[in-house]
Image: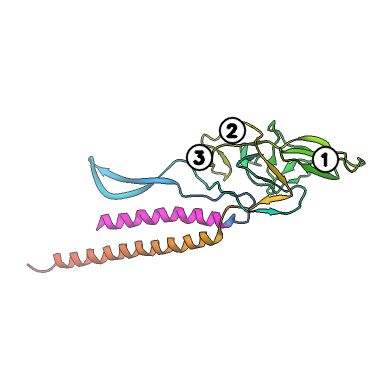
């Protein structure tokens, strides 16, 4: 009976991790450029006593946090500071707390120091991995290669000044992971080199690739699995009680 109970408990522990991923995905379903978290690869581990395997089994996770690299829905917002990456490239960002990371979030803006930031205040970096600082401007253009141009006050309508480039890079999804702070980096915690392969579209915003309906259906399936495991534990308890009663009968 111990083996049945331990197997059920191991399954419940795995479902707990899946619940965490599901809740995080649903919480970020409306965040631009968010990448859906996927279950980690894993296996099972057994405790051993005196070189003998026991019935006690525990789930083991391997590798970094993986995520879906599918492109989210593209919406035409018309906003001057909204950009979307049309290929698999990433922007470079400097989080408020932490090392340089990668991002697909394109709801850009300008902070009080005229630096380009994303929707949560992370600095968007240039091709030199420095903050993009804008001069006073009345209009802004972002070309398909990430070049940032502004029309300064007093300039003619078509007279734009080049400020710099938004830094971008392309890297296979299997070489990337989500760090503990939720930002995307390489498996060793670093970021790849700038290669300026990003293909930008101004006035367009990429949504998250989370499908809320699929997540809710997945949640229902996990709830059924949890109920099955609870029933297994109760069944093991009943079988154990029945065995104890038989052993207590007079001989």
Q: Give the distance between the C-alpha atoms of the residues marked 3 and 2, in whole angstroms.
A: 13 Å
Label total for image? 3
Q: Position of residue 154 (x, y in %)?
A: 93, 41
**Residue 148, x across and y down, in percent:** 77, 38
Q: What range is drawn magenta here? A: 1-26
Q: Which residue position is annotated with label 3?
A: 174
Q: Are marks 3 and 1 in contact (CB under 8 Å)?
A: no
Crowding near pointer 2: few (<14 within 10 Å), some, many (20+)? some
Identify the mark nearer the N-term, 3 or 2: 3
Q: Which residue is mark 2?
A: 192
10 Å crowding of disc 1: few (<14), some (14-19), many (20+): many
> Which residue does the numbered mark 1 point to in the structure image?
150
Magenta region's main secondary structure? helix
The residue sitting at 57% across, 45% down in the picture is 182
Disc 3 element: helix
Q: Judging from the image, what secondary structure is the residue with disc 2 in? A: loop
Q: Earlier in the sequence, mark 3 or mark 1?
A: 1
Q: Which residue is at a point 40% across and 64% down the rendered structure image?
A: 224
Q: CA distance from mark 1 to mark 2?
A: 29 Å
């Amino acid at each position: 009976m111990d083996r049945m109970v331990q197997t059920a408990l191991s399954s419940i522990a795995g479902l707990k991790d899946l619940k965490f991923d599901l809740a995080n995905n649903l919480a970020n379903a409306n965040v631009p450029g968010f990448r859906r978290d996927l279950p980690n690869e894993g296996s099972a581990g057994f405790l051993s006593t005196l070189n003998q395997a026991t019935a006690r089994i525990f789930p083991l996770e391997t590798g970094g946090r993986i995520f879906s690299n599918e492109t989210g829905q593209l919406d035409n917002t018309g906003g001057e500071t909204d950009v979307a990456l049309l290929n698999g490239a990433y922007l470079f960002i400097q989080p408020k707390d932490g090392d340089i990371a990668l991002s697909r979030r394109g709801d850009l803006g300008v902070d009080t120091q005229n630096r380009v930031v994303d929707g949560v205040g992370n600095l968007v970096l240039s091709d030199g991995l420095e903050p993009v600082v804008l001069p006073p401007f009345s209009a802004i253009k972002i070309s398909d290669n990430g070049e940032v141009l502004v029309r300064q006050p007093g300039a003619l309508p078509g007279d734009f000044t080049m400020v710099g480039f938004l830094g971008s890079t392309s890297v296979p999804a299997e070489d990337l992971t989500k760090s503990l702070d939720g930002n995307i980096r390489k498996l060793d915690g670093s970021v790849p080199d700038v290669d300026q392969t990003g293909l930008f579209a101004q006035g367009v915003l990429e949504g998250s690739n989370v499908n809320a309906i699929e997540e809710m259906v997945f949640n229902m399936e996990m709830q059924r699995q949890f109920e099955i495991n609870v029933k297994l534990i109760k069944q093991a308890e009943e079988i154990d009680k029945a065995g104890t009663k038989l052993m207590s009968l007079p001989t």
